Image: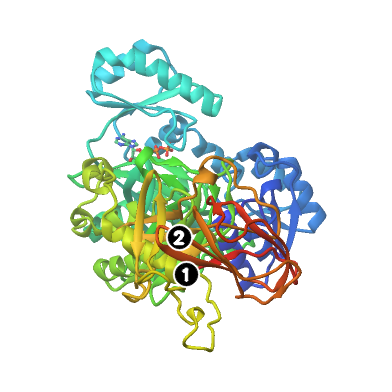
Amino acid sequence: MIQRLLIANRGEIACRIIRTARAMGIATVAVYSTVDRRARHVQEADMAMALSGARPSESYLDMTQLLDAARASGADAIHPGYGFLSENPAFARAVAEAGLTLIGPPASAIEAMGDKAAAKALMAQAGVPLVPGYHGTDQSPAAFARAAEQIGFPILLKASAGGGGKGMKIVERADELTAAIESARREALAAFGDDRLLLEKYLIRPRHVEIQIFADHRGNCVFLHERDCSIQRRHQKVLEEAPAPGLEPPLRQAMGQAAVRAARAIGYVGAGTLEFLLDARGDFYFMEMNTRLQVEHPVTEAITGLDLVEWQLRIARGEPLPLTQQQIPLQGHAIEVRLYAEDPDHDFLPASGQLQLYREPLPGPGQRIDSGVREGDEISPWYDPLLGKLIAWGNDREQTRQRLLDLLRRTLVGGIHSNRGFLLRLLQHPAFTAGALDTGFIAQHAAELLPEPTPLPEEFWEQAGRHFLATLPDEPRSDDPASPWARRSGLRLGGPATARLHLQCGDQQRRLYLDPESEPAPSLGAVRRGEVLFVPWQHQIYSVRRHDPLAAAGSHALPEGGLSAPMNGSVVRVLVQPGQQVEAGTALMVLEAMKMEHSVRADRSGTVRQLFFGEGDMVTEGSLLLELEPAGGDSPAAIIE
Ligand code: ADP
């Protein structure tokens, strides 16, 4: 029996595992690093145990702390998720020695597949087709050169201990080989502490098609069909789908059977994935086996209607596989995109910082979101920058694509670089729509997928400006229709009022003069978060601020309770006196600039303490006008109209 499950992971996968455990009546224990104290997975678990550091080595990779947490919390099983310790045989052994159940394969199976070269030797014995290559123990440059000549260029060097695309080098010509070997060795040594390499024929734009398998403790093994993961940047997946577009049933069958043979050859138990490269002729080659749950498992869940985490838990408690091979459904189509905090314009480098805007839509039919973040979270540089996964499914690929586009459009990310816009372009690219997938897809279509940034058009600024006006806090109006305060556009001393706005977006700026009453507020779905307006425009979400020269000059700290001038101008009227009690919405001063008048109002009730300017005085933007002691305790802000 498993009664209390410790999840040795974080982010979306921890939340995902908690969901199924809860549905099965299993209590959950989260662990968290020092920077994850308030993370979503911590709140969603039944219990949470602190780990002592922020770095992975001091937290989610620290076996001693994890086992201590399991003991202290009374957990009887550990789910490692993916990444971190999920494919570490020493951890699998330590968990078993501590008398706990690991939701994963036996240490021996992890070990057999952990080394790419050793795994290939095993797979060759089991009759699983391999990419032509060299994975021998002779690591001399001469041995690699001989193998490369035999196989023919281009070839690919890989780290035997590798993963995450590190240490991979494409070599086009014989005279580049020596330098490439040296460079790949250095990278492999730095990343994995092991500089052994292997060599493969570099297939030209193959597809990445992988098979999900499951095996129980009684020798049963089945495959849950395939996933196409050809859409990759930096040799890493960004979109996955099932079934693989255009894959004929006999090929599915052949790949599935090869995967089951591979799993049996190493005495596999639990969930695993056999990764293959598939060439244009329909020949497929084993690449590696991942001995854990994959990031992209939801697309398999969508087309089979099964819960893969539930299967993992049931197998771990000794139950047989719930279905035979013939009983495993394959219905419709499913696509997943990975929403990352990363910068597509800079080689998809991970981004960190505050997630100022994060809005997840309510999923409709055929839509699912697996995420692990909330608005306001800090995305730490220590961990994988995956924010979450958006998954859609439907009767066919086109319905699925439309549902995913809808889900993605309604998901808003702001304040940090993300690949949202890139994913929107990807899902709408004609080659993607046509299902013409291969691992070179992003490179081949880079011009459309990663367009050069263009200057923002006038319409953008105008819409953003109108939103700023529309999202100013609502003010109480005067009951007297003759009063200037009855008009949203303020005093009308010198002709029609115009609002002047100075907006900034990235390094672009624009001064705008808008008549607040001339047109209705725009319908575009911009979202205001404090001083920032997030504007979805075409495929991106832009952050627009009101330009603040004082802030730009680095001096913007104002004392608590202060109200400051929104722009340079002169004080035309002072409407209050020191000691006067004011209600929220009371006009305090009227300023004039560029023939426009603005009244400065209190947004909270309070008492005026001090006035710093009188009528006729000139004020500069940001200067403190008066001091207001709030009645409540919250510091007030000026309302400008
Ligand atoms: P890692 O374990 O570092 O992620 P993999 O061996 O899984 O590396 O390969 C990652 C990706 O690199 C594959 O999905 C594929 O796109 C590409 N790749 C790997 N081997 C080859 C090859 N022999 N020919 C062409 N592309 C390859």
Q: Say if residue 320 shows up in the picture.
A: no
Please name the residue that numbered disc 2 is placed on: 533
Please name the residue that numbered disc 1 is placed on: 471
Answer left or right for 246 relative to 353. left
Residues packed near mark 2 inside 10 Å, few (<14), some (14 to 19) or many (20 plus): many
How far apart marks 2 and 1 lie (CA) works out to 9 Å
Quadrant position of residue 244: bottom left
Where's residue 365, x and y in %? Answer: 39, 77
Front one among 33 and 289: 33
Instruction: Please name the residue shown 44% across and 45% down the image.
Output: 342
Quarter placement of the N terminus: bottom right
Dot 2 lies on which element? strand
Dot 1 lies on which element? loop
Q: Are marks 2 and 1 in contact (CB under 8 Å)?
A: yes
Compared with 324, 341 (above or below) is: above
Residues packed near mark 1 inside 10 Å, few (<14), some (14 to 19) or many (20 plus): some
The residue type indicated by label 1 comes to Thr
User: In which of the image's four quarters is ligand 1 placed?
Assistant: top left
